Image (cartoon, grey):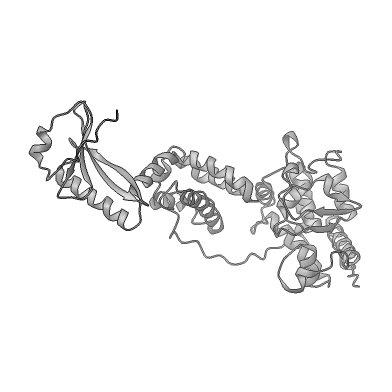
Amino acid sequence: MARPKSAKRKRQLTELFIEKAKPEERAYLVWDEKQHGLVLQMQPTGAKAWKAIYRFNGRPRWYHIGKASAVGLKDARLLAAEVMLAAAKGTDMAANRKAQRSVGTFAELHDRYLEHAKRVNKSWEQSDRLVRRYARGRWANLQASAITRADVKSMLAPMEATPILRNQVLASCSAVLSWGVKEDLLRDNPCKLIERNKTTARERVASETEIPLLWSAFEKAGMQGAALKAVLLSGQRPGECARLRHEHLKDGWWQMPGKPVPELGWKGTKNGEDHAVWLPPAVRDIIASTNGETTGFVFAGSRGRPINDLDGTMRAICEQLQLTDPIKPHDLRRTHGSWITGLGFGRDAMNRIQNHKEGGIADVYDRFQYRDENKRIMEAVAAHIMALVNGQEEAAANVISLKR
């Protein structure tokens, strides 16, 4: 037989009543008539606690305010009023508290974010390195929900002299915290409203005198150096060159699938479009000298995985060469593009070869119509660069454009 439901106990609570309230065999609630939603919960053990009970999306919610021995009646009423007001405005305080408890530390949040980022973000590895180097060490054991805007500013303060790095670190941390908000794990992203540094578009290219110096340094930089040579001679994106696979090489062409191929570790091209680029003999020689394999990553690191940290390799090389204006891996790609236009082939040719997606006719090029022309352009640019590498300035100056 079902136990009869006990009558709802209601009264205007007083400090005296709370003090003298006695426990019973079962826990019970006493509703305050003065503050809607406030109840005193009495346990069989004699423990007394304040709860705010409200409805959200048609369902009852219980919000624990605190022990009656720690929170007075007046404060309990004020806190219950805040919970009820939040619910009326569309905020579920009980759910928010649960989310804040479940998210754990920043390190735990970052680990969960990475599971998501690896599936959708092609550049997750670079962001991961920035978070680990500059933020995770500081915040690893902090509750993610406790990180404040002041904590973010303190972490960024040493980077004021490196505005681009500061922007990158801020964006990488913000991505982690924004994901936490999106997944209802956090209430807010403390990186919001922190201003990014104003930057200008980078235009750095390697000069004719710097190219042989860089090449010599690449020779001593192992597999990373070989990949950087490929960036300079092919004009393709550093991340794509680092993941160049033997399976995508055919008859001198590097045929990149636009979409990711997870089983091969290929992340796809930046714009999602299939792309084919001719590899001049100098690039094919670099590939042949790497590991002698015919499958897998050309520039493989430990356990056959693709190499990483081309940025770090370039920083070390620029420090070694004492370059006052450092060169980044992407600047090598820009250098190649500048020679496509510098040798008279035009911006359309550069966009086509470097797989830029600018709209208009560039989106509807026949992939085969320009293969012969692209091949001649790649050969001409590579010949010019290798002439500079070999100290043959006169030969480099005599490289002519082979227009259709």
Q: Nearer the viewer, residue 153 or 19?
A: 19
| Res 207 seen here | no
Q: Is 176 situated left or right of 59 in this image?
A: right
Instruction: Say if 138 sits above or below 355 in the image.
Output: above
Residue appearing at x 31%, y 53% in the figure: 87
Residue 311 place in picture, x, y as percent: 66, 50
Q: Depth check: give the residue in front, 223 or 279.
A: 279
Q: Position of residue 330 (x, y in %)?
A: 69, 57
Residue 172 in picture, x, y percent from top left: 54, 51
Instruction: Give the image quarter of residue 352.
Output: bottom right
In this picture, residue 38 sits left or right of residue 305: left
Quadrant that contains the N terminus: top left
Report the residue that reaches farthest toward the front. Answer: 1
Q: Residue at x 48, y 50 (%)?
A: 177
- Viewer-closest of 393 and 301: 301
Q: How many marks?
A: 0
State the residue lying farthest toward the left.
Answer: 16
Query: Which residue is drawn at the image coordinates 80% and 63% (left, top)?
Result: 353
Q: Residue at x 44, y 59 (%)?
A: 194
Task: Please tell me whether residue 313 is drawn above or below residue 364 in the rendered image.
Answer: above
Camera-nearest residue between 81 and 103: 81
Position of residue 16 measured from the top left corner of the image (x, y, whole percent): 7, 38
Left-right relation of 105 to 226:
left
- 16, above or below 57, in the image: above
Q: Quadrant of the C terminus?
A: bottom right
Q: For residue 323, say whether it is visible.
A: yes
